[in-house]
Amino acid sequence: MLYFNLIRSTIVLTFLISFEIKADFKKNLPEDYEYQNNNESIKPKEKKKNEIEISKKSGSPKNDNDLKNDLANHNQNAPVYFEGNSAEGSRKTGVLNLIGNVVIIQDDLKLTANKAQIISSQGKTFGSGSTTVKKAIATGNVNIYKKGTSNTPEIRAVANEIEFQVPEKIMVLTGKAKVWRNKEFVNAEIITINLNTGDISLKDPHGTIDPKSTNSFSKDNKITEKKNNL
């Protein structure tokens, strides 16, 4: 009986290991993103002098201060890249848990956190660079950084927890959520961002708005574009 149980335990262990997913994802991250420890603040690279001059000469679009358009200007169908110090999960359940120095990237959007859970379709391979990721839930020291361009500024955000619903293109920031964009700052208990439309909804919001901005808050706490009265 003891011999039979030993054989059965060995078979079960071998079965579980066969579905284990390792966390060696760093080599798969896009080359234009440098790996950064999430304990450090996310800081954009400084522009060179000639890049600043070119930006000034090119000018800004009329609605450059429109946060809604800046968020919507994101390739939501791009592959999702991720990495961590360690991981455990299985293809059978479609769940992968990343632990330590977690980095998640899609297009120009970068997320760092202490821990994250990647949820994909059951039974399918979902390594870094996958297009089958359904959801990513990040917790602990969560930071978001969206790259700026010559026409759009960078956007930064922090929260206790962030849920990234990939197919729906929705990001939900929960717990002391904050979003920065140039001189604008929004603080709320819950911030929901629609990356497809650029709409932002806030629960219990506080913040400051740049007087020169074209953004305004509607009664339902959504950022909307001001219309010029002729």
Image (cartoon, grey):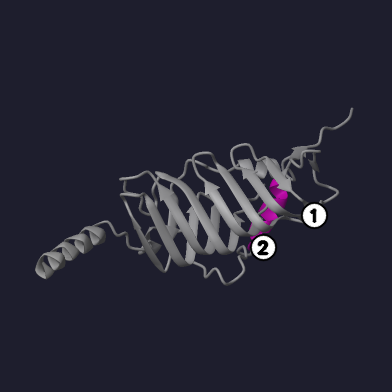
Amino acid of disc 2:
Lys
Q: Which mark is residue 207?
A: 1
Q: Which residue is mark 2?
A: 49
Q: Magenta segment, principal secondary structure?
A: helix
In front: label 2 or label 1? 1
Where's residue 77, x and y in %? 48, 40
**Residue 98 appears anywhere in the view:** yes
Where's residue 91, x and y in %? 31, 51
Q: Are marks 2 and 1 in contact (CB under 8 Å)?
A: no
Quadrant that contains the N terminus: bottom left
Name the element at disc 2: helix
Residue in the picture at 11% in, 64% down: 4
Where's residue 86, x and y in %? 39, 67
Which region is colored magenta? Answer: 47-58
Most foreground residue, 37 or 136: 136
Is the residue 216 above or below the residue 84 in the image? above
In the picture provided, is 32 more to the left or to the right than 70? left
